[in-house]
Amino acid sequence: MGLTLESLDVLQGEPDWLGERRRGALATYERLPHPSKTDEEWRRTDISGLNPAQFSELEHQDGFKLAGRSTLPRGVILEPLRVAAEKHPDLVKPHLFSLIRADRDRFSALHAAFFTGGTFLYVPDGVVIDEPIVGQHTSHAGGTAFLPHTLIVAGRGARFHYLDEYIGQDDEAVGYRSGSAEIFAGEGAEVAYVAVQKWGRNAWHFGDQRARIDKDAKLRLFNVTLGGRFSKTRVEASLVGQGAEAELKGLYLASGQQFFDFHTLQDHQVGNTRSDLLFKGALQDTARTVYAGLIRIEKGAARSDAYQANRNLVLSDHAKATSIPMLEIDNNDVRCTHGATVGPVDPQHMFYLRSRGIPEPTAKRMLVQGFFGDVLDRIPFEHARNLIEADLVARLG
Amino acid sequence: MARFRVASVAELPDETLKRVDAGSTPVCIAHAEDGKFYALNDICTHEEFNLSEGELWGMDVECPQHGSRFNLVTGKVTGLPAVIPAKSYPVSVEGEDIFVEVPE
Amino acid sequence: MATVPKVDVGTDYKEKYGFFVPEDYIFKAKRGLNPEIVKEISWMKKEPEWMLKFRLRSLEMFRKKPMPNWGADLSVIDFENIFYYLKAQDKQSTSWEDLPPDIKKTYDRLGVPEAERKFLAGVSAQYESEVVYHSLHEELSKKGVIFTDTDSALRDHPELFKEYFGTVIPPADNKFAALNSAVWSGGSFIYVPKGVRVDIPLQAYFRINAENMGQFERTLIICDEGSFVHYIEGCTAPIYTTDSLHSAVVEIIVKKNARCRYTTIQNWSTNVFNLVTKRALAYGDATMEWVDGNLGSQITMKYPSVYLMEPGAKGDVLSVAFAGKGQHQDAGGKMIHVAPNTTSTITSKSISKGGGRTSYRGHIKMYPGANNSKSFVKCDALLLDDESRSDTYPYNDVDAENVTLGHEATVSKVSDEQLFYLMSRGITRSEAETMIVNGFIEPFTKELPLEYAVELNRLIQLEMEGSVG
């Protein structure tokens, strides 16, 4: 990214308020330091080889589509983000970058300054959409910067499915990728959100998925991470109304020299809320993964129920897995459990399959699929399930 | 093995350390108390801080962050908390030039 | 401190441990920390030149290192307001009768001589900066066991001392290890020769008496091949309105087939900052066990660790923390697996009450080559009211093949059903809560010698009564 105000001119045609925000975010970017190894969040996450300024060309797209053929119910707004910013500032302005704040760190600031389009979805109160909505973000060129943003606002009792697919056709050159989503689930809404990250294998990826869940609303979020040379993803849900519920599931398959970093947050701000998190990963070759997750139960959040688990299957001698499941509990009337495991393929299972004449690579693949079984069952809608299973089969060979 | 000229003798006064890059390999060069030059991989095997920012302590280099020590000649750990030896590389001096050999 | 299992409700910390006696010291260094104080300490102790150099360099490291940016809030510590060296009497005694009356009275009130008579093989008593009393059963010294204070060890066993001192925890390890290395004084030095088993425990008792005192003992334990020792430490201080600092370094080497158990009952008054670095090396088929009870202090930050250096080494941490009003116990353990076929467990039990905060912080690391190793961590937290807080921060790094690592944690409260059941039997609410807490920490108390288990249960009862601090 040419990190100057001039380079923002490619984004002309946006309303003034958005231009102002971008300039503000750029100033924040310039003010914030590059994270270092002595910052706790970056201790195991090496970005010393990254200089975002080297990616001067921005790829800019608006792409999204409905998975089926139906037209959208009345009142639903599904527009490119920049169009929506112009046409519906009353809806976009108060929400955009209010959950994923530009001043969180350098990469959030960069995203807010240079986001290259993306999608805005507004579903009014009581509206149900049956067909999944698919946002496809395809990078066509290597060496570029591509930063799509998704903003989802669900009215009271709204129900729908949304899939963000990040696709790279640029396996060779090193690029900068930043795909993020902000989700507002209004009272009683039911939102299913799936993100599948399959950028090229040399990309740097920084992604934030952050949701605010109101009274009696329910979010089912599923994150799949497969691509990139370096991928850092934060998945965060704030439960802000009684009866709110978040199911956060993740699946990652790291091979070759890939490095994946996940930060998750289950933020119980009020009582009678529920969250359930499971992230499962398999590591091959010299891949390295870091999972760090936090359940935070605030003082008044009595009768909260939170679960968090991270499970890693290590398939090679040289892979490295780090797992840091954390709890901060400020109320005693809660149910809170968490766990982490790191382990190899069960030798007994392997022995059993081999004794049946199944060759080792096939047996290994079967065991990986078996390992992912319980999390795959939690993919919230069929369209996404078919896609993810196909991606997984293709990658496991 | 690949051989790289990494520094001149003048750049390393007695009992000092310097970070150099031999191709893509980060190297810590030491001008030790015995007058000779030694080379270790610069990345501490404990928490990946740079040894070249640490201190010489006899024939050991001490990591600046947590005090792990490595023998300059062999790379062996001579003080915790590191437990994995540092890689050591052959050094040669020709005239004013210091060369290091690292695996390709 | 070991007494009959009598329930002393109404006795409180202040009476039992929180008293102080007048200072009548032969030497008291000025407040504050600078090279002159360090030189003065070294000069008073008539140390060799290398130790003075070691101290001065450590002081420099302490200055350079930032305060930890995690864990408890330490910004309130005023390093310039602390007395770094206080010497209460001229020489060390081997008989309680030889101690100055005030000091003797102190230990009598704490029950140390009585415990020694009953069930200890050796006792070391540190008062402020120096060890004032020392004893070891004669048959143990005949077998070659060394149990002395660390200053005497530097004088009397210079070679053994220099071979191991500072090799497990270098001064640069962390800010407080650097501070201790600069101003250390006292502590225990233990050497157990090959094949010798010390079947009854050795004990050290650390007492702070003066206000704004800094106690920096340094303990070094070497268990030679096939040996065994159980070392117990206890600590208390008077209650003052301003802060004191306790910052120890404990280094342990457990050689092949040896076993070392290190038990701590930390019961500092709530004006003490307790910032301690404890680390052990366990070699082939050796076992290191940390039994770590943290009841007192304002802030404790302590994570006993074991480096499992050779195949078959085993490490255990059993940790209990109790945080009452105004207290933050940030405790846990670390297991560093270096060699194949090594195993470790960490069991943590924490209790928070009256707005107290307990944090479990741990690290499991499996280095490449630590194949077929296993580690399991279990953390249970009990929150006794809705003002209190519990945190869990477990760091797990696996870089080896075919290893198994598991971590589990739960947070719970005293259940209404349990309380209702006990109260329906005529037990008061506070007694019922005490029973439930004692049950909760039973895995810990059952690892203690009986006398200590009784004492601990009594302390828990005092804490539950809210009469402490």
Image: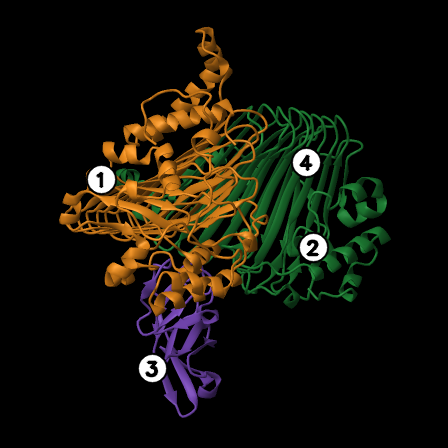
Q: Position of residue C173 (x, y in %)?
A: 43, 57
Compared to residue A177, the image places residue A188 above or below, namely: above
Q: Chain of mark 3?
A: B
Same chain letter for marks 1 and 4: no
Choose between A378 and C407: the one closer to the eye. Answer: C407
Give the residue pinned by disc 2. A109
**Chain A painted colour:** green
In front: mark 1 or mark 4? 1
Same chain letter for marks 1 and 3: no
Q: Is disc 2 placed on a helix, strand or loop?
A: helix
Choose between A123 and C272: the one closer to the eye. Answer: C272
In this rendering, does residue A367 appear at all? no
**Chain C painted colour:** orange
Give the residue pinned by disc 3. B34
Q: Residue at x 54, y 48 (%)?
A: C70
Label 2 amino acid? Ala
How far is the residue under mark 1 from the one under mark 3? 49 Å
Q: Residue at x 43, y 91 (%)?
A: B96
If you read the primary sequence from the N terminus, does the residue marked by circle 4 or circle 2 appear first?
Answer: 2
Q: Chain of mark 2?
A: A
Choose between A136 and A299: the one closer to the eye. Answer: A299
Chain identifier matching the purple colour in the rendered picture: B
> Outermost residue toward the bottom?
B95
Give the residue pinned by disc 1. C121
How far is the residue under mark 3 from the one under mark 2? 51 Å
Circle 4 residues within 10 Å: few <14, some 14–19, many ≥20: many
